[in-house]
Image (spheres, helix red, strand yellow):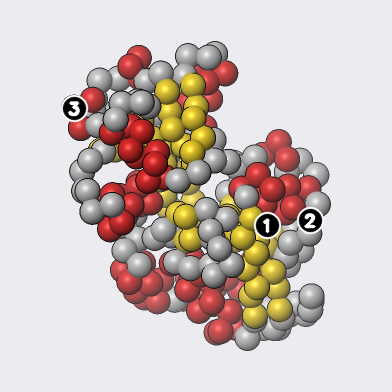
Amino acid sequence: MNKLTSSAGSGEYTIGVEGVDNLPVANGENSNYTGYARELLDTFADKYGHKFNYRPMPVDRLMDEFAVKKSLDFKFPDNPHWASDLKTDANITYSASSVTVIDGLFVKPMHKGKGLDRIKTIATQRGFTPFPYLAEIEAKKIKVDEIDSMGDAVKLVEAERADGIFMGQVVTNYLMNEVMKQPGILVFDDKLPNASSEYSLATVKHTELVKQFDEFLSTGKDTVARLKSKHKVVE
């Protein structure tokens, strides 16, 4: 890999991405990485003369490759609070947020507002942690079912085989509205624990390029807004 020699330098880099379908933000289920994140990063790369190679992999392996083995130039998305126990020996630089996602529980409309006591089983995407519920999970008050397909997870909740699905609002709403064509089959319960996650570009190697990305996000607000609108990323 070429090394970035200045804030205006160019190079070819590998970005590790999640090998899951999280549209409209991104889909890394195959080698053809797609979605808002892909177009945003490619637009940035084109502006500054970089070339990005995207390497999708399972969520747990991605974090290990990035933070422990340090085999990747960048990881997207990342957040300082994710897998912090694996990052103790990694000096990671994070960009500003490229999108902010509210993570929480989607439940059947009839169960919205009924409180935490009724939540016994949470469905979530494999490799993701329902971190606002860690205390209840560790106390064995809540069980977590990791599912490969988020469409299947939605169906589990709709069939009452799970009490809620833990996922980002933008992703779940897109899945129900645009993919399943069943808007409102589940609803976000804002009375249950939830958290805001900022999706950043992260590196252990190329701090100056992350600074470039921050500059791109700051000066290109219209471009970012246009891409969010195009991909139906609603924050």
Q: Earlier in the sequence, mark 1 or mark 3?
A: 1
In the image shown, does 199 or 61 lie closer to the viewer? 61
Left or right of 142, for residue 108: left
Q: What element carries label 3?
A: helix
**Marks 2 & 3, CB-CB < 8 Å contact:** no
Quarter of the image with the C terminus is: bottom left
Residue 221 horizontal/vertical position (percent): 40, 72
Residue 77 horizontal/vertical position (percent): 56, 56
Q: What residue did someone put label 2 on?
A: 70
Q: Is residue 56 above or below residue 131?
A: below
Q: How far apart are marks 1 and 2 (CA)?
A: 13 Å
Q: What residue did someone put label 3 on?
A: 110
Q: Which amino acid does label 3 sit on?
A: Met
Quarter of the image with the N terminus is: bottom right
Residue 103 horizontal/vertical position (percent): 42, 41
In the image shown, does 22 or 195 lie closer to the viewer? 22
Q: How crowded is mark 2: few (under 14 residues within 10 Å), some or many (20 or more)?
A: some
Q: How far apart are marks 2 and 3 (CA)?
A: 46 Å
Q: Which of marks 1 and 2 is nearer the N terminus?
A: 2
Q: Earlier in the sequence, mark 2 or mark 3?
A: 2
**Marks 1 & 3, CB-CB < 8 Å contact:** no
Is residue 214 shown to the viewer in this render? no
* Number of numbered discs: 3
Q: What residue type is labelled 2?
A: Lys
Q: Which amino acid does label 1 sit on?
A: Thr
Residue 184 horizontal/vertical position (percent): 20, 43
* Residue located 65% across and 44% down the image: 60
Q: What residue did someone put label 1 on?
A: 93
- For the residues carrying marks 2 and 3, which lies nearer the camera in this image? 3
Left or right of 122, for residue 51: right
- For the residues carrying marks 1 and 3, which lies nearer the camera in this image? 3
